[in-house]
């Protein structure tokens, strides 16, 4: 049996050697399996690619795929899936927040034959800023309600999958990729393996708050069309709400002098209604524009990534 480990890298020069040493230790522990390490350099600006090249010269199991620029983690993962050859395929981060020591347990679960993949989820977010943790938890709750795809709170991209599941992922060649949603959408039986949060071995997170916010919207756009239905619900709400000022107007006209104070009240209500409706329309036009922009990106049919350098024969480019 062969295990392919996909490792997206972006400016990970300080993490690579500790990660590689741990992967070698795991490989020695699992000596009955063949290993394939696929390092995908996502346009790093430090010495990441040089280190990976040196590793590939010393270890024939190391494959590197270097992009011509930074295409993003999703493209790096997709390139790894397209070029993996193992019976089992895992994807993990280079900063060791996805502990390689879990691999033997994950393989053992897959070998039982009951599951098609073993996915990891963090039990806590220790070490993460509270604001970031709050918004992450809010995203999982919102995504659960607006999408038909279920994502477990604390889910990581770190998972081990059988070849059949990987082939299904590769067949989904959409450009607006959100892997956590894709993993859930394709089905297959998944075992969730919890683990304590691990601090990164070096460096810092490449995901700023705004990048994560954009990524979360990408996930919603990719797996939910319920936002497009919101204007219908909102128009019904406005129609219902508009009866309140009408009823008040009739009541005031019947019980008071029409000209005593009512014009100012009416002007305020009209101004509020115009501003509220204008704001709502702008919001929904913005949602529609975002969906249209995603459609625009899909129909252009550009490749997910461009390979600048690699030591792999017959590289798969999509």
Image (cartoon, rainbow, N blue to C red):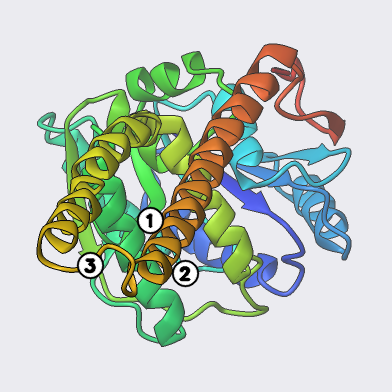
Give left or right: position of 195 versus 60. left
Secondary structure type for disc 2: loop
Q: Residues within 10 Å of mark 3 (few under 14, many from 20)?
A: few
Which numbered dot is residue 156?
Answer: 1
Secondary structure type for disc 3: loop
Residue depicted at x 70% and y 27%: 304
Q: How many marks?
A: 3
Which tag, 2 or 3, sits closer to the chain's start?
Answer: 2
Q: Which residue is mark 3?
A: 257
Residue depicted at x 25% and y 59%: 153
Picture coordinates of residue 302 (x, y %)? 76, 19
Q: Residues within 10 Å of mark 1 (few under 14, many from 20)?
A: some
Give the distance between the C-alpha atoms of the residues marked 1 and 2, in whole angstroms. 10 Å
> Which quarter shows the C terminus?
top right
Give left or right: position of 136 versus 123. right
Q: Quadrant of residue 17?
A: bottom right
Which tag, 1 or 3, sits closer to the chain's start?
Answer: 1
Give the distance between the C-alpha atoms of the residues marked 1 and 3, in whole angstroms. 66 Å
Asked if 8 appears above or below 98 in the picture, the reply is above
Picture coordinates of residue 85 (x, y %)? 53, 23
Secondary structure type for disc 1: strand
Q: Are marks 1 and 2 in contact (CB under 8 Å)?
A: yes
Q: Which residue is mark 2?
A: 97
Give the distance between the C-alpha atoms of the residues marked 2 and 3, in whole angstroms. 72 Å
Picture coordinates of residue 155 (x, y %)? 32, 56
Q: Quadrant of residue 95?
A: bottom right
In the image shown, does 213 or 182 lie closer to the viewer? 213
Asked if 231 appears above or below 107 in the picture, the reply is above
Which tag, 1 or 2, sits closer to the chain's start?
Answer: 2
């Amino acid at each position: 049996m062969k295990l392919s480990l996909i490792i997206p890298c972006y400016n990970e020069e300080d993490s690579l050697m500790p990660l590689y040493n741990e992967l070698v230790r795991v490989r020695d522990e699992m000596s009955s399996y063949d290993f394939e390490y696929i390092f995908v350099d996502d346009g790093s600006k430090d010495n990441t690619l040089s280190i990976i090249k040196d590793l590939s010269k010393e270890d024939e199991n190391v494959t590197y795929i270097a992009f011509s620029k930074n295409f993003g983690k999703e493209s790096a993962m997709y390139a790894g899936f397209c070029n993996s050859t193992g019976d089992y395929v895992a994807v993990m981060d280079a900063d060791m927040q996805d502990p390689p020591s879990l691999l033997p347990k994950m393989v053992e679960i897959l070998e039982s034959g009951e599951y098609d993949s073993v996915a990891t989820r963090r039990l806590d977010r220790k070490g993460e800023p509270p604001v970031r943790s709050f918004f992450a938890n809010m995203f999982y709750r919102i995504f659960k309600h607006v999408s038909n795809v279920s994502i477990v709170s604390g889910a990581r991209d770190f998972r081990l999958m059988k070849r059949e599941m990987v082939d299904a992922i590769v067949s989904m060649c959409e450009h607006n990729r959100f892997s956590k949603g894709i993993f859930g959408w394709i089905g297959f039986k998944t075992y969730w393996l919890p683990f304590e949060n691990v601090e990164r071995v070096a460096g810092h997170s490449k995901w700023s708050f705004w990048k994560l916010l954009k990524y979360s919207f990408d996930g919603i756009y990719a797996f939910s069309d319920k936002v497009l239905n919101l204007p219908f619900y909102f128009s019904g709400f406005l129609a219902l709400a508009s009866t309140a000022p009408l009823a008040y107007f009739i009541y005031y006209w019947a019980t008071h002098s029409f000209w005593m104070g009512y014009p100012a009240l009416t002007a305020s209500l009209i101004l509020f209604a115009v501003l509220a409706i204008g704001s709502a329309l702008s919001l929904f036009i913005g949602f529609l524009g975002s969906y249209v922009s995603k459609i625009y990106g899909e129909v252009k049919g550009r490749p997910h990534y461009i390979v600048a350098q690699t030591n792999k024969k017959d590289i798969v480019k999509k």
